[in-house]
Image: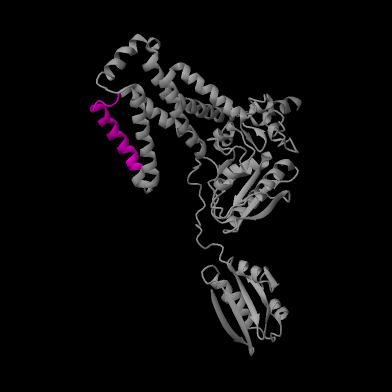
């Protein structure tokens, strides 16, 4: 804490501020310099306020308020001999400690805008205002965290978003008794309908276009200062397999790539468990043409299929974690070279078979098709309980796992909305933009399960055919 005294126009003025968090250029030019070049005499705090061309200025004599404002970047100005009251001027350095690069690195976009959020909440709000130029875009600010005093913003579009969702989010945030809010992921876990589920119940994204799309659909977005990720809800499990690129491509291509993601998720979860079940209990389902290569590949493997699969799956997970923690170039090299070297060494040592290496590699590759990182982590986790069930009861264990998974999904809700709608409850119209991406003239309405106040998203007017114009002439 810095305390300094300046004599300006024969008047002793005391300044108190935190040197580390104030904008020194703003303090020197807009406060000190303005006072020094002022031709009028400074008689009281009101006259001093008129000389400072800044907006966030207030009078205060409350010690608690003064201390809170000082640690948030304000300067406290007092005039001798009256020290009972002073002037609080907000001169915080908002860019301190925040990056200027706002590209969405973890959600890379091949087609479309590449603008992402940053850690500064004011910058993020400006990005949203530039994308949605409407007075219906509303922001509601809350301060959470007894120690961190973190700014949290509820964002929604009036006359589109259902007020019940906004009230639910607001009430859950106000009921929090937390000391430090590190990231929006903390809020995601705390206000979720079911905190014990491995499935993410809020959409988490660093892309501006995805958040804009969610807001226009009628969802509620949540921003936190210090976090480059925005969470939004209510959401369904199918929303996590939708990529913004689907809408930048023709609907046929968008639907094709979306179906590939669903196939990749299914293969990633079930490939290794099915391998364990078949080689442990169901040899009869293997075609005779494949039986000989499988027997030859596993002739020197001393482990049961379950231990063989667990060894390779855990190796792949270790490579992923090591690659994620290392610098980018080193991590990519480790993932490629490490996978090739360890796979070849495992086959030569007789610890695993060639066929299993192909299955595990394709399974790991399929998990990367999921656009959202949190859902990709869930898919990586689900393989292990399925493998254990397959080792215990074979195909019956896989079916039991699917039934338990479906029962868990049926019970999940996001802000009171069923997690697997439109499958359950069944909503035929919402299938147009879930498993496939329909053409724009068929998907002009917002999803009905979000219960938006305005269902119509846009209207497509088909132009007259040119041949008809020629015929009329």
Q: Is residue 338 magenta?
A: yes
Q: Residue, x 68% and y 25% (percent of image)?
A: 427
Asked if residue 404 lies left or right of residue 284, the reply is right
Q: Residue at x 67, y 34 (%)?
A: 417
Return the x and y of residue 2 as percentages of the image width and height. Answer: 54, 76
Q: Quadrant of residue 62?
A: bottom right
Q: Is residue 5 visible?
A: yes
* Residue 162 showing in the rendered view: no
Residue 368 point in image, percent of width and height: 45, 34
> How many numbered circles does the render carry?
0
- Place of residue 275 in the rendered image (x, y in percent of width and height, measured from the top left): 39, 20
Residue 295 vs 434, above or below: the answer is above
Q: Quick one: quadrant of the C terminus?
A: top right
Q: In this rendered view, identify the residue nearer to me: 389 or 151.
A: 389
The front one of 399 and 424 is 399
Q: Which residues are magenta?
A: 332-353
The location of residue 465, given as percent across then percent down, is 70, 28
Provide the major secondary structure of the magenta segment: helix
- Which residue is drawn at the image coordinates 41% and 18% (left, top)? 277
View extreme (bottom): residue:
10
Q: Is residue 132 above or below residue 80?
A: above
- Seen at 64% across and 90% down, the residue is 10
221 is within the stretch colored magenta: no
């Amino acid at each position: 804490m810095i305390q300094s005294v300046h004599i300006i126009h024969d008047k002793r003025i005391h300044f108190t501020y935190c040197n580390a968090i104030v904008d020194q250029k703003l303090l020197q030019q807009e406060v000190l310099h303005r006072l020094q070049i002022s031709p009028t005499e400074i008689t009281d705090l009101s006259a001093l306020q008129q000389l400072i061309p800044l907006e966030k200025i207030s009078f205060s004599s409350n010690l608690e308020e003064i201390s809170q404002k000082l640690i948030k970047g304000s300067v406290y100005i007092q005039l001798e001999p009256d020290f009972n009251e002073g002037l609080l001027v907000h001169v915080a350095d908002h860019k301190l400690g925040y990056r200027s690069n706002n590209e969405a690195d973890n959600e890379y976009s091949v087609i479309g805008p590449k603008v992402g959020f940053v850690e500064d909440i004011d910058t993020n709000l400006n990005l949203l205002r530039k994308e949605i130029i409407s007075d219906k875009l509303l922001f509601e600010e809350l301060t959470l965290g007894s120690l961190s005093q973190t700014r949290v913003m509820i964002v929604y579009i009036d006359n589109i978003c259902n007020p019940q969702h906004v009230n639910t989010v607001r009430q859950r945030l106000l009921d929090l008794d937390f000391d430090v809010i590190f990231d929006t992921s903390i809020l995601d876990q705390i206000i979720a309908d079911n905190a014990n589920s491995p499935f993410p119940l809020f959409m988490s994204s660093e892309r501006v276009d995805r958040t804009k799309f969610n807001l226009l659909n009628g969802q509620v977005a949540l921003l936190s200062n210090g976090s480059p990720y925005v969470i939004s809800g209510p959401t369904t499990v199918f929303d996590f397999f939708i990529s913004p690129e689907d809408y930048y491509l023709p609907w046929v291509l968008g639907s094709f790539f979306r179906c590939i993601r669903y196939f990749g998720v299914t293969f990633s979860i079930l490939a290794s468990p099915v391998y364990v079940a078949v080689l442990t209990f169901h040899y009869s389902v293997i075609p005779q043409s494949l039986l000989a290569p499988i027997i030859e590949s596993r002739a020197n493997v001393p482990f049961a299929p379950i231990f063989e699969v667990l060894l390779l799956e855990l190796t792949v997970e270790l490579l992923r974690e090591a690659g994620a923690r290392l610098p980018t170039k080193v991590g990519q090299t480790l993932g490629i070279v490490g996978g090739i070297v360890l796979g070849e060494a495992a086959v030569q040592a007789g610890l695993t078979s060639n066929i299993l290496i192909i299955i595990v590699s394709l399974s790991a590759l399929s998990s990367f098709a999921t656009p959202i990182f949190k859902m990709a982590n869930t898919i990586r986790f689900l393989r292990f309980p399925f493998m254990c069930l397959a080792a215990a009861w074979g195909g019956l264990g896989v079916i039991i796992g699917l039934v338990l998974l479906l029962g868990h999904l049926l019970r999940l809700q996001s802000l009171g909305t069923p997690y697997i709608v439109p499958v359950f409850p069944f909503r035929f119209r919402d299938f147009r933009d879930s498993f496939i991406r329909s053409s724009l003239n068929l998907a002009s309405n917002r999803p009905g399960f979000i219960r938006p106040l305005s269902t119509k998203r846009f209207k497509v007017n088909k132009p007259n055919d040119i041949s008809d114009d020629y015929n009329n002439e």
